[in-house]
Image (cartoon, rainbow, N blue to C red):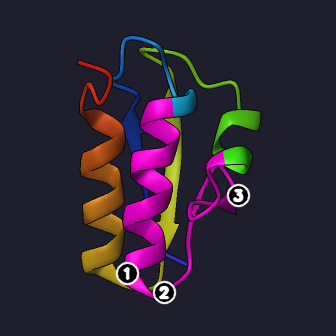
């Protein structure tokens, strides 16, 4: 599965609001996307990663458009 390393951009890390936004988008895509091996369509699973601002995570998907879409969200400050 292709992966992309991205730096978490949200000031609060991958916590409640950013995780919910990412999970909602991942669910809409209809393909498997993971962040550090956990299901990106589950905000609870994303939050269990404990990824903070500036941490590097691995986004993976067999669908290149989905991979780029989720990677771009992880890089943004979604809590602003």
The answer to whether residue 69 is above or below residue 53 is below
Question: Which image quadrant is residue 11 in?
Answer: top left
Question: Which residue, given by chain and number where applicable, does mark 1 sit on?
Answer: 29
Question: Which residue, given by chain and number where applicable, does mark 3 sit on?
Answer: 37
Circle 1 residues within 10 Å: few <14, some 14–19, many ≥20: some
Asked if the residue at tag 1 contacts the one at tag 2, i.e. Cβ–Cβ closer than 8 Å, the answer is yes
Say which element carries label 3: loop
Q: Whole-percent x and y of residue 35?
A: 58, 53
The answer to whether residue 65 is above or below residue 41 is below
For residue 75, which numbered disc appears in the image?
none
Q: Nearer the viewer, mark 1 or mark 3?
A: 1
Left or right side of 69 for 6: right
- Which is more N-terminal, label 3 or label 1? 1
Image quarter hosting the C terminus: top left
Q: Residue at x 36, y 41 (%)?
A: 74
Distance from Cα at disc 2 to Cα at disc 1: 6 Å
- Which is more N-terminal, label 3 or label 2? 2
Question: Which image quadrant is residue 40 in?
Answer: bottom right
Q: Residue at x 46, y 32 (%)?
A: 17
The answer to whether residue 18 is above or below residue 2 is above
Q: Is residue 59 magenta?
A: no
Q: Residue at x 35, y 21 (%)?
A: 10
Question: Which residue, given by chain and number where applicable, does mark 2 sit on?
Answer: 31
What span is colored magenta in the figure? 17-43
Q: Is residue 28 magenta?
A: yes
Q: Residue at x 42, y 51 (%)?
A: 22
Circle 3 residues within 10 Å: few <14, some 14–19, many ≥20: some
Distance from Cα at disc 2 to Cα at disc 3: 14 Å
Q: Whole-percent x and y of residue 34?
A: 59, 63
Say which element carries label 2: loop
């Amino acid at each position: 599965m292709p992966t992309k390393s991205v730096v978490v951009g949200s000031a609060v890390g991958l916590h409640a609001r950013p995780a919910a936004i990412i999970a909602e988008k991942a669910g809409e895509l209809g393909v498997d996307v993971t962040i550090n091996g956990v299901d990106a369509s589950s905000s609870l699973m994303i939050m269990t990663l404990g990824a903070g601002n500036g941490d590097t995570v691995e986004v993976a998907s067999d669908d290149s458009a989905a991979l780029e879409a989720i990677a771009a969200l992880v890089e943004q400050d979604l809590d602003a």
